[in-house]
Image (spheres, rainbow, N blue to C red):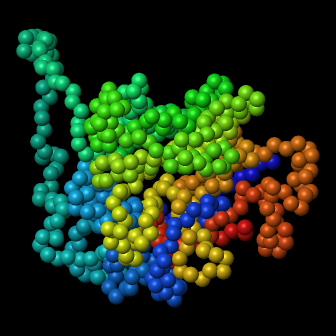
Amino acid sequence: MKAFHAYTFASFIAGKTAFRDVLAAEQTNDEVYAIPHDVADISDSVTADNSAFLMPPGCTCKRNGASGQQCDQFDCTCQCDLTAGICDFNCCCDVECTEDEVLAFSSCLDEGNPSPMARMCVEGANAFVDINAKYPLSLSDSAEARFHNLLCVEKDNSAVKGTFFHDQGYPKASQAFSPGGMGTKQIGFETQQHTPVTNSYGAYRFGDPIAAFKISDEELTTAFGGYLVLPQAVDGGGCVELLAAAFGKDKTNSCLRQTDNLALDCEHRFNSMRYISDIFVEKTKGSVVLGTSRQTSNLQSAIPIEVTKFTDSKGDAFTNTKSLPQTSWDEASFTCTNALKRMKYILEYNQTTINSISVEIETADVDIQTSALKQGFEITFVPAKSSDSIERSRAKNNLITRPRSGNPGYIVGRPTLGARKPNANSTVSYVDALKAGFTVMDTGSAGKCDSSSPTGSVVGFATDVYVGCTQSMTRRQLKEFCTSNEHPMLLRRKVGGTENFVYPKWLESGHDFLGIFGNADPLDRRQWVKIESPL
């Protein structure tokens, strides 16, 4: 038996910055953004207004007399502000950034696309009046505007009257290779002064690689070649540990941890502890001295990785880091138990310094017949300053702290925003936005449906997705699957005129809405398009 998901984006508006129609919708995870307690106070006006939402949040209306979101002529700026409620690195126009944070930026990102205006000359105003001029089309007859960035042709530079150079021909060999000639070069040796290599000590800048260290013989040495790594996939999907984690850059990767000998690789290549046990990161750039003893005070410059959540292969969660299940090979069952499946680094920072680093780990059991395990790696940066210090408002679209997939238009490849109704009969004006976005099933371990996660794949904007898995059965299992009224792999629901519509559980839909814009506000239901699905 095979189960497949196919997703196609139907149409886009404003140059792939938003979408209106979706052909299908599937399962999502259950983690949603919390709705502020006073949401009822800010939602009454939205509930009463059922009109379409035209102007994205964060934009400025350019139509005289138009009201707010009903404006259909607008300008949008600060496209680098991709996190609501948090100062974005190097986004100098982000209203949530303090002056000190802006001063610490290494550079300023593009605040928006350059103006799409094209200045042209017209012979007279009458030629302009004949067309139906709308914003931003306008006419200016001032002297300065007439020649702003325009090329004025003073003379007709005819090819017949132009200035030409005479062909000098090739130089003679005696001229080219004689001492001092054009074809000679003086070669010799000269003494160079040796410049000692020094560590750059100071603040982290956006994009700086994060140095990593480990304890070896009670002293600090470099780990992973010197930097904290985030394994990524190469051609064929295999994992390589070449990508260094960059300060301020959230990143999510997945790859296949492959093996030819699981028993040999289990406690090393599949071990969850190899990325965290006795591993440290540098608090301030260039502050760690190699060879420092574990007992010295200088070790305070190196921050240890703390495990805040560990979920074993049975689904049990551990918070006591002193008694974490270990990755081990079980000779009796030929299984690698608690092999690393997913790891998420969480770095708390204060402008240009790392305050702490924690990790969440999820493991799985891998049997000897499996040649590869899909692993997920993620790193996210969380500001240390209190969110209470940030001015929040509906107009700023930051009442709910969350990442955006564009501001306002979607960025191709970023997660598509997904949401659902707060409850089946809800009439409130907000939606429950899913933190992971619009997610669907993954292929599972070795393509097996019974190990597939219904929320394992995130659907990127403007990215078609085709996901499938295979379920093997004996004849008896297949008979039970086809004839039983209840089956753990099947779900039944009334769909249209069909009283008992049966479908695989991996195709269960958990979405009701998709965000029209990349910065769609969960507190305004009009900014979300309803998904039409029979399930």
Q: Tell whether 415 sits left or right of 220.
A: right
- The structure residue drawn at horizontal position 32% and vertical position 40%, both measured from the top left corner, is 300
Q: Residue at x 40, y 70 (%)?
A: 398
Where residue 347 appears, as percent x and y from the top left, is 41, 49
Q: Is residue 534 left or right of residue 530?
A: right
Residue drawn 47% across the image and 71% down it: 521
Measuring from the top left, give residue 328's x and y in whole percent. 64, 32
Camera-side residue of 10 and 140: 10
Q: Is residue 46 above or below residue 97?
A: below
Name which quarter of the figure residue 419 lies in.
bottom right
Q: Position of residue 454 (x, y in %)?
A: 67, 54
Residue 197: image quadrant is top left
Q: Residue at x 69, y 68 (%)?
A: 533
- Across and down, in percent, residue 431 comes to 55, 73
In the orientation shown, which residue stands out farthest toward the front?
A: 295
> Of 130 and 47, which appears nearest the observer?
47
Exactly how many numbered labels are in the figure? 0
- Is any part of residue 22 visible from this angle? yes
The quarter of the rendered structure image containing the C terminus is: bottom right
Q: Residue furthest left?
A: 180
Can residue 13 be seen in the rendering of this structure?
Answer: no
Look at the picture and state if 504 lies above or below 282: below
Relative vertical location of residue 95 with respect to residue 189 in this rendering, above or below: below
369 left or right, relative to 114: right
Residue nearest the observer in this picture, 23 or 401 = 401
Q: Quadrant of residue 493?
A: bottom right
